Image (spheres, rainbow, N blue to C red):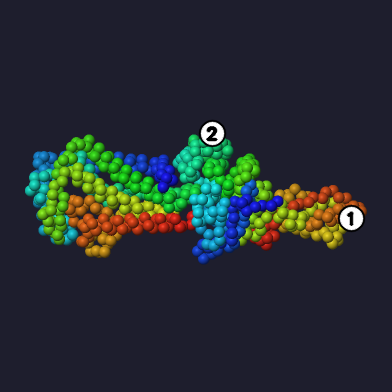
């Protein structure tokens, strides 16, 4: 798949930010293309929100350049920001106005948005029933939707959402995911920040992993997963003999403490007698054969793809996620 | 320039929907009847005492003040005030003009004279102090500044809105004061003469340039000065609102400045360089009346210049800070 320059909606080029004497953002670079859902993953305090604020000209970078559709965000705000819809942190709207009045307010700030367009975005986020109520009466989920309606008003090419599933119930989260995929399918570039790894995995095509103001890796979500070797969970009987045999195979490494490498959700569904190993894909059938020929019954072999969490732990050498 | 108008419309809608302006109107509507009632009471008492003859009453006040001049317990500065007051009242008596005729117009004039340095600035703060810091307090500044509009345009629209509402507040105060006091004192009195142009040399009043103007004309001049004071206070409150993150802090800062002005004015004279502070220069209408300025060397032009410079500086600082600052929270 070849990408041309014109596909790039957002380019962030070696951006740095110093606040006081501290470098909050040390070096951040990435690009987002049309129709792509781009994840921005990092623990709290890694610099996600600071970066997002620089993308929408709330903060000026100390060094580096941010361009939206070819326009410098800090020097040509009016041209650049017309292509951007965003929610930075919480979707804070004027609580003393109704949802509709809020949308009218923001519509007036950009030429070419008429009443029909407001009606359209209200329908997109399915707010038609409550849109004429005061925002102070809205639930968090509704505020989130109103925030998105606001972001969509100007038919943006780039949608920036800061932790969009925060505070939503499971149904709301699922709806949000479908919604984001739909927008991307229509050609919009969507930038989503999150500290939830599962979220990014389900939502994004590509991801940048950020920690302490540095981008550790940028790549396709699948690529990043395939790059690191997978884990395999064995259910064998008798377990002791099975463990012995697997341990003796040179191509197979038995993990003594699986809780250190596996996600809690995986561990929860695993029997205590299961054996966790690290083994290459092509060696698995040989290992099975070896077990079976030594009269060990193989009850189950489960490959477990590493989660982004493991990836993250490897990259940051154990800095905690939360 | 076309895209500024919708921004101003936005700001006006927000001020109105926030109900700040209604609160201000409500405050005026509650306070004016109170002062009117006080005025009615004092008029009644004087009527009983002097058989409705204002000349007797005025003569009595002049005599009272003259007697107090001999007392050692009265501070020097007060004596000067009274000396000037006596000479002015004597002038009114000589010209056979009642300076305190109880009419709606007269009440309005007196009320505005007293309201200009604290009451009206307080009302203005209710809007000005919230204009920018309010957006930061509730976080909407992030949505406001991520739209494709330059920051100076956003701030400029707020400034224009502020000027409009300041003007509206002054108009409303005049209208309500006249409307309510008129119920008690009648709506006449626009043609009555008022003397202006007293010049003060030390403790002497120079009456050579004194001339009578009809009340309505006096009210217009007064309104102009009130408007100027109000605008400069509004600009300063606006700047504080840009600099300070929370509306509450913004109000407290301005309130402290205004009240310190009142205190300094009363302490008066000794610290002469205090005259360069904006808050002792708020009482512009007193120059029109011809009363002694709080600090020696202050004239109408001086005060106008001081207020003008402070206001201009406030606007420059507001725009510089607002267009450059990082929005971190």
Residues marked 2 and 1, same chain: yes
Task: Give me the chain letter of mark 1.
Answer: A
For the residue pair B313 and B112, the one nearer the viewer reads as B313
Q: Where is B104 relative to B211, above or below?
A: above
Quadrant of the frame with the C terminus of chain A: bottom right
Q: Is residue B94 left or right of residue A26?
A: left
Q: Is residue B128 left or right of residue A203?
A: left
As drawn, which residue projects farthest toward the bottom? Answer: A21
Pointer 2 residue: A129
- Which x, y percent locates residue B196? 16, 50
Q: What label does residue B309 carry, if any?
A: none
Task: Describe the element under mark 1 as helix, strand or loop.
Answer: helix
Tell me the residue at 22%/43% (across/down): B108
Task: Describe the element under mark 2 as helix, strand or loop.
Answer: loop
For the residue pair B218 and A70, the one nearer the viewer reads as A70
- Which x, y percent locates residue A71? 54, 54
Tell me the residue at 45%/49% (across/down): B135
For the residue pair B300 and A175, the one nearer the viewer reads as B300
Which of pointers 2 and 1 lies earlier in the amino acid sequence? 2
- Which x, y percent locates residue A159? 58, 47
Pointer 1 residue: A290
User: Cα distance, mark 2 to mark 1?
Assistant: 65 Å
Tell me the residue at 53%/42% (across/down): A153
Q: In the rendered image, is residue A227 in sight?
A: yes
């Amino acid at each position: 798949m070849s990408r041309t320059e014109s596909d790039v909606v957002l380019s962030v080029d070696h951006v740095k930010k110093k606040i006081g004497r501290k470098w909050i953002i040390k070096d951040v670079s990435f690009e987002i293309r049309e129709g792509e859902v781009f994840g921005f993953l990092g623990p709290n305090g890694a610099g996600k929100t600071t970066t997002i604020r620089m993308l929408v000209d709330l903060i000026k970078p100390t060094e580096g350049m941010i361009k939206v559709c070819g326009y410098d965000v800090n020097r040509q705000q009016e041209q650049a920001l017309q292509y951007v819809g965003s929610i930075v942190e919480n979707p804070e709207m004027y609580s003393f106005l109704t949802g509709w009045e809020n949308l009218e307010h923001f519509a007036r700030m950009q030429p070419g948005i008429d009443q029909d367009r407001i009606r359209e975005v209200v329908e997109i986020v399915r707010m038609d029933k409550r849109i004429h109520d005061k925002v102070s009466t809205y639930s968090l989920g509704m505020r989130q939707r109103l925030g998105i309606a606001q972001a969509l008003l100007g038919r943006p090419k780039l949608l920036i959402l800061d932790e969009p599933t925060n505070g939503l119930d499971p149904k709301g989260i699922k709806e949000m995911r479908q919604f984001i995929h739909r927008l991307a399918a229509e050609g919009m570039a969507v930038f989503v920040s999150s500290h939830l790894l599962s979220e990014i995995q389900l939502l994004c095509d590509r991801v940048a992993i950020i920690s302490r103001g540095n981008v550790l890796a940028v790549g396709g979500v699948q690529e990043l997963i395939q790059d690191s070797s997978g884990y395999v969970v064995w259910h064998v009987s008798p377990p002791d003999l099975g463990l012995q045999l697997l341990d003796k195979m040179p191509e197979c490494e038995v993990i003594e403490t699986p809780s250190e490498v596996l996600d809690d959700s995986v561990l929860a569904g695993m029997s205590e007698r299961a054996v966790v190993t690290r083994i290459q894909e092509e060696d698995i059938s040989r290992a099975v054969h070896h077990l079976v020929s030594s009269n060990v019954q193989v009850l189950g072999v489960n490959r477990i793809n590493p989660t982004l969490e493991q990836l993250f732990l490897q990259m940051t050498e154990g800095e905690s996620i939360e | 320039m076309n895209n500024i108008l919708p921004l101003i419309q936005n700001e006006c809608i927000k001020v109105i929907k926030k109900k700040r302006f209604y609160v201000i109107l409500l405050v005026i509507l509650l306070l004016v009847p109170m002062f009117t009632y006080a005025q009615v009471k004092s008029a009644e008492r004087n009527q009983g005492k002097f058989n409705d003859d204002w000349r007797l009453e005025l003569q009595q006040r002049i005599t009272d003040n003259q007697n107090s001049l001999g007392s050692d317990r009265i501070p020097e500065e007060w004596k000067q005030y009274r000396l000037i007051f006596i000479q002015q009242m004597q002038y009114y008596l000589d010209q056979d003009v009642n300076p305190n005729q109880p009419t709606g117009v007269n009440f309005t004039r007196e009320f505005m004279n007293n309201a200009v340095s604290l009451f009206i600035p307080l009302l203005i703060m209710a809007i000005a102090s919230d204009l920018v810091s309010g957006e930061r307090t509730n976080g909407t500044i992030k949505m406001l500044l991520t739209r494709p509009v330059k920051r100076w345009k956003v701030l400029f629209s707020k400034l224009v809105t502020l000027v409009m509402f300041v003007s509206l507040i002054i108009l409303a105060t005049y209208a309500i004061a006249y409307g309510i006091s008129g119920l008690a004192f009648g709506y006449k009195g626009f043609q009555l003469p008022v003397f202006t142009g007293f010049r003060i040399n030390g403790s002497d009043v120079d009456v050579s340039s004194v001339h009578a103007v009809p009340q309505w004309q006096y009210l217009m001049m007064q309104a102009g000065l009130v408007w100027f004071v109000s605008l400069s206070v509004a600009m300063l409150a606006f700047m504080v609102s840009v600099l300070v993150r929370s509306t509450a802090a913004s109000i407290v800062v301005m309130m402290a400045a205004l009240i310190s002005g009142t205190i300094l004015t009363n302490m008066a004279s000794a610290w002469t360089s205090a005259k360069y502070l904006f808050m002792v220069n708020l009482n512009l209408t007193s120059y029109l009346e011809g009363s002694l300025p709080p600090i020696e060397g202050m004239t109408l032009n001086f005060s106008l210049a001081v207020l003008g410079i402070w206001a201009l500086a406030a606007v420059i600082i507001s725009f510089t800070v607002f267009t450059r600052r990082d929005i971190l929270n």
